[in-house]
Image: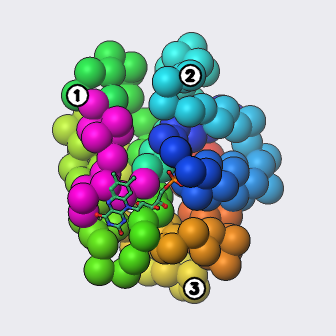
Amino acid sequence: MKLAIVYYSESGNTKQAAEYVAEGMKKAGAEVGLFELDKIDEAFVAEAKAVVFGAPTFYADTCWQMKKFFDETKLPLAGKIGATFGTAGYLQGGCEIALQNNVVRMLCKGMLVYSGGCALGEPLTHLGAIALGGHVEEQKEQFVTLGERVAAQAARL
Ligand SMILES: Cc1cc2nc3c(=O)[nH]c(=O)nc-3n(C[C@H](O)[C@H](O)[C@H](O)COP(=O)(O)O)c2cc1C
């Protein structure tokens, strides 16, 4: 089963988070494609059962590069599981708004948005996984768990 992660990262926080999400997917036995936004293997993503989007928060929204991706992409995302994670500088900086807006964009693309929410216990993944202030390693469990949960749900599709 192929699963993809598409992320944007300037200073490395979201890249590290993406690697943890990939770790969780691999633990679940998936073949994982980890792609920077401008280096997407489109054939892999087209075959993937799930695509997880990761982005830093810019001005209390997902970064403009991710918004541009959703505006422009012609990738066949409809019907795939979609999930999201993000990083931000600080608690009141709007990362949850950024995740919510990624959720809205995934819905617009016809994706089946999933995180496991609070149904599967701790850690509660709700809108997705978040790390603040560069403390990505401290939130590793959240990102790994999101990857595992997406992989498990994709296997059920
Ligand atoms: C242009 C710009 C705008 C930002 N705006 C916010 C913001 O509104 N709220 C916030 O919490 N952090 C903000 N940040 C901080 C980044 O979201 C944070 O450092 C993030 O982890 C960077 O991810 P990266 O290392 O993957 O590039 C901003 C950073 C930049 C460069």
Query: Which amino acid, mark 3?
Result: Glu
**Upstream in the sequence, badge 3 or badge 2?**
2
Q: Secondary structure at mark 2?
A: loop
Answer with left or right where residue 110 lies relative to residue 21: left
- Residue 119 at what x, y percent from top left? 46, 78
* Outermost residue toward the bottom in this view: 122
- Residue 123 at what x, y percent from top left? 57, 81
Query: Which amino acid, mark 1?
Result: Asp
**Ligand 1 near label 3 (Cβ, under 8 Å)?**
no
The residue range painted magenta reads: 56-68
At 24% from the left and 63% from the top, the residue drawn is 60
At 42% from the left and 66% from the top, the residue drawn is 88
- Residue 33 at what x, y percent from top left? 66, 33
Query: Which amino acid, mark 2?
Result: Lys
- Residue 127 at what x, y percent from top left? 37, 67
- Name the residue carrying label 1: 71
Examine the structure image and report whether residue 64 is included in the region drawn in magenta.
yes
At 56% from the left and 22% from the top, the residue drawn is 39
Q: Is residue 120 something one can see in this rendering?
A: yes
Instruction: Name the quadrant where ligand 1 sits.
Output: bottom left
Q: Label 1: few (<14), some or many (≥20) within 10 Å?
A: few
Question: In the picture shown, does residue 130 fall above or below 7?
Answer: below
- Image quarter of the N terminus: top right
Q: Is residue 28 something one can see in this rendering?
A: no
- Name the residue carrying label 2: 39
* Outermost residue toward the front in this view: 11
- Name the residue carrying label 3: 122
Q: CA distance from mark 3 to mark 2?
A: 33 Å
Question: In the picture shown, does residue 107 fall above or below 91?
Answer: above
Q: Label 3: few (<14), some or many (≥20) within 10 Å?
A: few
